[in-house]
Image (cartoon, rainbow, N blue to C red):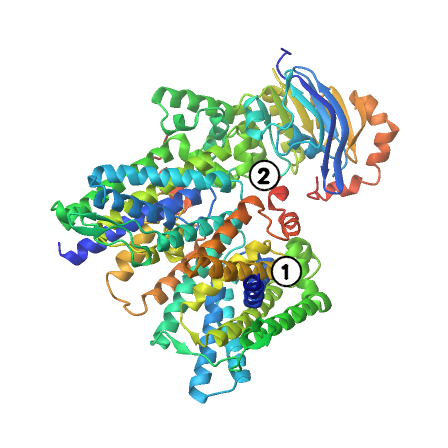
Amino acid sequence: MLDFVQNLIDGLMVGSSYALLALGFTLIFGAMRRLNLSYGPSIMVGVFAGTLVHMQYSAGLIAVAAATMIGSAIATVYVERLCFAAVRSGAAVASMVSSFAVWMQIEEAVTLAFPRRTYAFPALSDAPPIYVGELFFRIEYVVMAIVAALVMLVLYAILNRTRFGLQLRAVSQNPVAARYSGINIPAVTLQAFLLAAVIGAIAGFLIAGTDQQITPRFGLWATIKGLIAMMLGGLGSIPGAILGGLLLGVVEAQSQWYLGTEYRDLMAYLVLFAFLVLRPGGLMGTVAVTQDREAARRL
Amino acid sequence: MASPGTLRIEGLTKRFQALTALEDVDLALESGEALGLIGPNGSGKTTLFNLISGVYPPSAGRISFNGNDITGDPAHRISRRSIGRTFQNLRLFPRMTVYENVRAARHAGAPALSQLWVGRAARRVERDAVMDRLAEVGLADRAEDLAAELPLAGQRRLELARALAAKPTLLLLDEPAGGMTPAETDHMAEIIATHAMPGRSVIVVEHKLDMLSRLCNRLCVLNFGRKIAEGTADAVLRNPDVLEAYLGTEDEQDRHAPVD
Amino acid sequence: MDDFTISVISNIGLFSFVALSAYLLLLTGEISFGQQAYFALGAYGAGIATVMWGWPLAIAVVWAVAIGMAAGALVALPTVRLRGLYYSIATLAFAEMVRNAFLIFRYRREVDGFEVGPAGAEGFRDIRYIYETGISSFEYMLLIYALLAGVMLLFLLMETARLGAVFRMIGDDPVLAEMQGIDVTRYKVLAAAIAGGIAALGGCLYAHMVTYVEPAIFNVMLGVHALAYGLIGGLGTAFGPILGVIIDIGVLESTRAFSGYRMIVFGGLVAVILIVRPRGLLDETLVHRVRLWLRPAR
């Protein structure tokens, strides 16, 4: 029982970073109804920018975090311009495949710039774990969970209290109506991509700071985790993305402990597959499914 | 067995979450009869077509066709029972040719693997049938064009040709002259009268009442998902409920709002 | 022909199978991120058959296709009703399940004094059938292309007959296809089975050419590449995906013109192609024009 609770806590804390990745995917998907496979790789660019600042100038955590955000924002703008803004409307698959091609580009460019593949990343904290009774909390995980929670609060405020948030929600719920009411959709879309880039960069910073290292494969890893978490929660739902991330973290932690490391990913995919088949809307399904009126509208 | 093209609808209701699109509608159509269906936008006309053709199952009520209960059957099975339709907002296979679009209607009911090979004789029969349908709607010379290259009126006629190619005994036409000029509308009405109506039952949804009264001997009026009147064209159009339903919504129709 | 040329041409052939597999599903309007799973099942299944059970390659090929078709149909049954991204992610989840399962899967036994068979993450070594039977790499290349020609014949037959039109109708507008009397669910399962069989055939041939397979080969990258090939080459004809493979492997990889930054060139090329032609180089409109030009009066 103690093990289970410990895994649950660890899983929730790690899951909070998955939730951030899922939120980024959801923002982009909400704005475009398209999937940006290059989301993880863009974050990876940011994390490498952070590493660079760390190595060259032995900068502090704040500067590294800033570099991470700037790096992933620049990469994201490149992806958005090339794969989304430039590709015709109605060609969602082309956008997705194009974002994959650009992913290949980014990964190779980073590998050329950082030929050693594995690089050190500054630790979030090197304090020893805190013990509460028989449970222990890794400080990095605690920082991760707290920062993630703060980011979610800020995102909530942005979406519900600002003009941009209102416009983004309008675009994601009904692009046609949004355009007729004078919303500049390309601008809102670009801003959504940038917001997603910043959120993703924070997640990337937290994860790399916990692992204390980074490789170009981080792009693949982040895309996959974010996608799974988003789909578990329910496509297009903000609360769903958060719940999906947490669920993914818990499933991984529990199966790693009870079944072994080699079963960790297998179980995560099994849960995902089961969710998709048995409850295609995900955890917060009904919201997403009713929003996805594509089929109904074509009739 | 009832004679072909007989439709019986009893207590048909369709709810989408909070919205009731169609409520307790009864309708009967005899073999070879032509019925006009009118009503303001959002009154449930297309919903009724979607229920008959099996796009989604009804929330309550029964539909029977030729004496067989078809309530809740999947669309492909209903189509094979020889119910054909066209769509208010045009549905074609845009990347296929005009010819292929009409041929598409002839796949019905063939077993899955028999489609891999079509013999020469069968191909000729098929070709003649498809070209006959295209000739009827005046598109024979455009057979090799992509469907997307046709003008709107041509696309509507192509839809009609496709529906006819499946040899339906019941044909559902959803605004066959929608968006057409008066001349195109006349042409369409003539095509329907000479090629679509003989030998089959037809339900036509149309806002153009003169076209409707030319084609149909009976009208049925829906408003807010309920049937508010039914009878001969003259009687229906003098019905006070109908006038009330239409007044004040007249200008909305011109905007072609994609509701319903 | 030198060994390098043979290996490049053989690779083009092998990856064409996965590309065609993903292409067939694209025709029916489904984006699968998971065709590498059937490639893996074919590779492992056929490898086990020739190495451990001593079957001849010809039977192993049939066996691999059967595995691929069965798995494709089985996965399709619960997933066909999923739309769009849900389907894509479900196929991804399945493929990753297969890959992770092969990371755990051990099936070892002694054959001729050596222990052989899949050994989890260490992979599956010594799939040496073609070397033991003295088939040269040139002859094997011909075998790959003979089988690829068979698959292409199937596609061309499909396009001239009705089945291809049915698949394209489903891809364009499944509801409208359903209204033409087509049992969309059944055809989608059929397409998934055929696609699974084609990918497994490629996997079987791949395993016997390289003699060593490991789960890491069959990751998402392979699946998304397969998808991209069809979309670059074009969705108008089955030559499209093959053109995509040729552009990537044949031109960029083999000429070594851009060694070191090949992916940067390839990625940019794909992005530009998709801006100009969202349905690929050989898209339906172009294929239609070519067809009219070849056959002016029908």
Q: Which quadrant would the N terminus of chain A be assigned to in this image?
A: bottom right
Label at residue B152: 2
Q: Chain of mark 2?
A: B
Q: Secondary structure at mark 1?
A: helix
Q: Is residue A35 visible?
A: no
Q: Residue at x 33, y 58 (%)?
A: C121
Q: Position of residue C108 (x, y in %)?
A: 27, 50
The residue wearing badge 1 is: A238
Dividing the picture into quadrants, the one containing residue A109 is bottom left
Q: For this rendering, which residue is in front, C78 or A293? A: C78
Q: Which quadrant would the C terminus of chain A be assigned to in this image?
A: top right
Label at residue A40: none
Q: Residue at x 69, y 15 (%)?
A: B30
> Residue A220 vs residue A12: left or right?
left
Q: Position of residue C271 (x, y in %)?
A: 42, 60
Instruction: Using the image, determine if residue C80 lies above or below residue A69.
Output: above
Crowd class of label 1 (few under 14; some 14 to 19; many from 20; radius 10 Å): many
> Residue B233 vs residue A15: left or right?
right
* Amino acid type shown at disc 2: Leu
Instruction: Using the image, determine if residue C186 lies above or below residue C238.
Output: above
